[in-house]
Image (spheres, grey):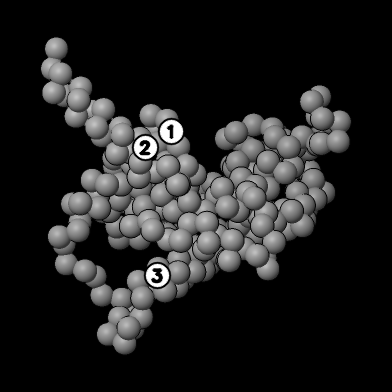
Amino acid sequence: MNYTLIKDYIDLLQKFENETLAYPELYPGTVEGFKAWISDNENSTRKSHSEEPYWEGKENGRTPESAISTLLVHLNRYAKTYSKSAILDSEFSTQEDFIYLINLKAFGEMTKMALIKKNIHDKPVGMLIITRLLRQGLIEQTDSDLDKRSKLVRITERGQQILENQMEKIRQATNIVAGNLTHTEKMDLIRILNKLDRFHYPIFSRNINSEQLISTVYDEYTFKIS
């Protein structure tokens, strides 16, 4: 038995626990969390020696965090533009309509709040979308056996048909959003965006009041993450 390998593995696990103890939302204490931590560290090590990229305003002291935030906003707007084109002459009013249906088709029936949270919406916005889909007959609702106060929603046959009618254009739109990235770049981007999503989703799920949101998150995390 290779005891040196076992010792190295235990040391690596200990390092994982020490470095991620303060950030359980980012790297849960599971095999998947451990794998994500290793992957992120390998990527950081591999790219730490590469030339730093340019971003607009860098020469004037603009921070990388500012550039990241702006670029994410821009990309979201580009994606919405393509999505709007993909649903022209359909029964969908917004891209959120078909995204809700795609989630219901992929994951099956769920409570209204589970569907809203999966799409990262506030309750009022999500309820408007669900109400619209119900009115159009694209989804239906039933009482939950576990909680009579909750309603379960599922995609209807009509909803599946309407969704399928637009799927070719929707797929084309998603391909365009990925732009001219190579396969390797797409995989790297997915890993980075997954890391950001693992950071933000638990915070979003806490429904922290807007007045306390920034101060609460900033105080809790103190941004020691590299």
> Which is more N-terminal, label 2 or label 1?
2
In this view, the mark in front (1 or 2): 2
| Residue receiving disc 2 | 17
Of the 4 image quadrants, the one containing the C terminus is bottom left
2 or 3: tag closer to the N-terminus: 2
Image position of 182 with respect to 157: above or below: below
Name the element at disc 1: loop
What residue is rendered at 36% in x and 80% in y?
A: 62
Residue 147 in the image, given as x and y percentages of width and height? 82, 30
State the residue in front, 18 or 92.
18
Classify 151 as above or below 175. above
Find residue 192 and report its horizontal and vertical position in percent. 36, 52
State the image coordinates of residue 68 (x, y, percent, origin top left): 40, 68
How crowded pointer 2 is (Cα within 10 Å; few <14, some 14-19, many 20+) is rated as some
Q: Are marks 2 and 3 in contact (CB under 8 Å)?
A: no
Going by the numbered disc 2, the residue's amino acid type is Glu
The three-letter amino acid code for the residue at tag 1 is Gly
Viewer-side residue, 119 vs 105: 119
In the rendered structure, are the residues bearing label 1 and label 2 in contact, judged by CB atoms less than 8 Å apart? yes
Look at label 3 and name its amino acid: Glu
Q: Name the residue under label 1.
A: 29
Residue to which mark 3 is pinned: 65
Helix or strand or loop: what does disc 3 sit on? helix
Q: Which of marks 1 and 3 is nearer the N terminus?
A: 1
Q: Quadrant of the N terminus?
A: top left
Quadrant of the rendered image containing residue 7: top left
Rendering coords of residue 59 (x, y %):
27, 85
Q: Residue furthest bottom?
A: 60
Q: Which residue is drawn at 29% across and 57% down?
A: 181
* Left or right of residue 46, residue 23 in this image: right
Residue depicted at x 49% and y 44%: 25
